Image: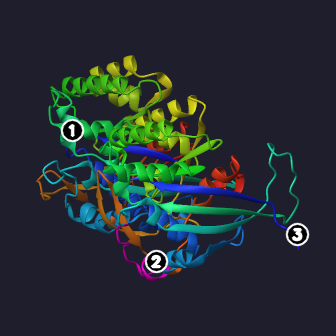
Amino acid sequence: MTELPSSNAVVRVIGDRGAGKTAYMASLARWPNADAKSPVQTIIPIGESGEELVAKAQNILEQGLQLEATRLDANAIDVKDYTLRITLKGQFSWKKSHFRIGSQLVNLNVSCKDYAGEFFTDLLQISGSSQLEDYLEDCLQATGIMFLVDGNSNRKDKEYANALDKFLTALDRTDISVGTRRIALVLTKCEQSELWINRHKASFLADARFPQICSRLKSWQQMGVGSVDYFTCSAFGMLGQNYPEPNMSLISRGPDGVTAVIKDPKRWRPFGLVAPIYWICTGDRHQELDKD
Amino acid sequence: MGNIRIIGPRSSGKTTYLAALAYQPEISQQKQKKLRVQAINDDTKKLAEKAENIILEGASLEPSITQVNTIDDLAVYSFNIEFQKRFKKENLTLAVRDYPGEIFEELEHGSSNPLHQEFIEECLTRDVTGCLILLTEWKPGTDKSYSRVIKRFTELMDIHNRANDLRLAVVMGKCERGELWPGRLEPEMDLFAVHLPKTRTILRNKIPAKNLHFYAISTFGVLGHNNPRPNRIEEWGTDGRNSILREPDRWRPYGLISPLYWLSTGKEMAHDR
């Protein structure tokens, strides 16, 4: 059997506590109620850590419960590395001038570390911390960074932009070129009505709600060390075809964003999870994934 | 698709308006199938359930600044509106936030309350397509007050860089009142120019023409085509200023959808009862 064309990526997922990083990873690994029309053929979690993610999804999220907050490991090396193989039905890519006919498949092999929120909010405040240095070194291994932000936490725009600034500065200071680095700004929890309405306009939405984060990212991009793109997603997804409603029961809403659990686990279907990964792996936007 | 904010003084009928919209599926008019309004989140469904209390019994559901501590305490109502236009079906999805009346009123003299700042900022973020400003009174002095509020609001729009792209639907509510009903067809000339001239002038001066429209609505409607008496009884509701529906079987709200349609699409709706 011929090898499928594949793209590999090493990704680090960062973001504030409660941004939904672990829920994102678990939902991706579980890939519930897959739509036959989706360009995603399969998602296979590899190894023990991959199975752990699926277990989190089945035993917690699918039971309508909340995930526990991820704890900050003493060393970055201890942070679990989740590996997923995502198989997609191919699409035409102008950049690569391949015309993929019919049912050609493409593999995305992603190895992902999900950093506890404390890294982003606390560690970055402390300069000279060896733990921070350790995490940053680990981050340098990554070809792609997924910066997850709760789409409803727009009041923390300035705070997040400051943390991001420290992160990017530190990254650039220690950098040995790894090739083009990609940073995906991923707005989570976009099942919320105000966000869902603009889910197909991710860069507009990001710029409207998080202007300072976006401005910082644009400056970084202008330095020529990498590229940035914008995404919307929801680990919980929507309910219903004709009049989609958020598939969630709200627990709380505040300046940090929204906390919720899945309302109808049997009809659990996330949206927008794969698009940022595809982009990080290939540098292209996938038309069908973007239609989610 | 649109993110919309509704502002206006207390008791202008903002929440009642939204409740009537959420409740639409229940009334017999819906059976014509020309228009279908669907509540698409929990807050809106709760509002639809309470709609009977609000409209039939005069209960007040208006968010008051005393109960609302932060912007997060405000509900976000979400509707899907489906129109049958000849052979085509058109769909509109809206997310609407209903602001406490105090926010509007305090714009007149300015407020140092940082909470109010937050509200206004939330109102003017770039992903908000438009604001529906609901006004109802024209007692002596009201025009002057409103015009000051509007002036301040347009200044804030400018500060937040929305002066050229935020749509404003300025709506005269409760137009089932006798003196207003005939003017409902030409709201700018027959209602605003007549009763709120200063306010109208400020709006025309400050807002680009394509971003400003005037409307008249009536949540309660009138009793009938040949019987244009308000379908309303003044009752002592929970805060003594509310009305209830006189004849529920003959409930025909007027013009509820047009302002929302225009705010989200920038186009005028062809036909709205």
Q: Is residue A106 magenta?
A: no
**Residue extending furthest top?**
B205
Location of mark 1 (residue): B116
Task: Determine crowd level at label 1: few under 14, some 14-19, many 20+ residues with C-alpha closer than 10 A.
Answer: many
Badges 3 and 1, same chain? no
User: Badge 3, how many Cα within 10 Å: few under 14, some, many 20+?
Assistant: few
Amino acid tagged 3: Thr
| Magenta region, residue range | A57-70
Q: Choose the circle earlier in sequence order: 2 or 3.
A: 3
Q: For mark 1, give the secondary structure.
A: helix
Magenta stretch: includes residue A67: yes
Q: Nearer the viewer, mark 1 or mark 2?
A: 2
Q: Residues within 10 Å of mark 2 (few under 14, many from 20)?
A: many
Q: In this figure, which residue is indicated by the disc labeled 3?
A: A2
Percent position of residue B94, x then y: 46, 51
Identify residue type, mark 2: Lys
Looking at the picture, which amino acid does disc 1 mark?
A: His
Q: Describe residue A251's horizontal placement relative to residue A199 as left or right.
A: left
The quadrant holding residue B28 is bottom left
Question: Label 1 near label 3: C-beta < 8 Å?
Answer: no
The chain holding disc 3 is A
**Residue at position x 57%, y 72% in the image:** A29
* Depicted A112 relative to depicted A48: above or below: above
Give the residue pinned by disc 2: A56
Q: Residue at x 48, y 76 (%)?
A: A57
| Viewer-closest of B231 and A116 | A116
Question: What's the distance in space between the residues labelled 2 and 3, CA to CA?
Answer: 34 Å
Distance CA(mark 3)–CA(mark 1): 63 Å
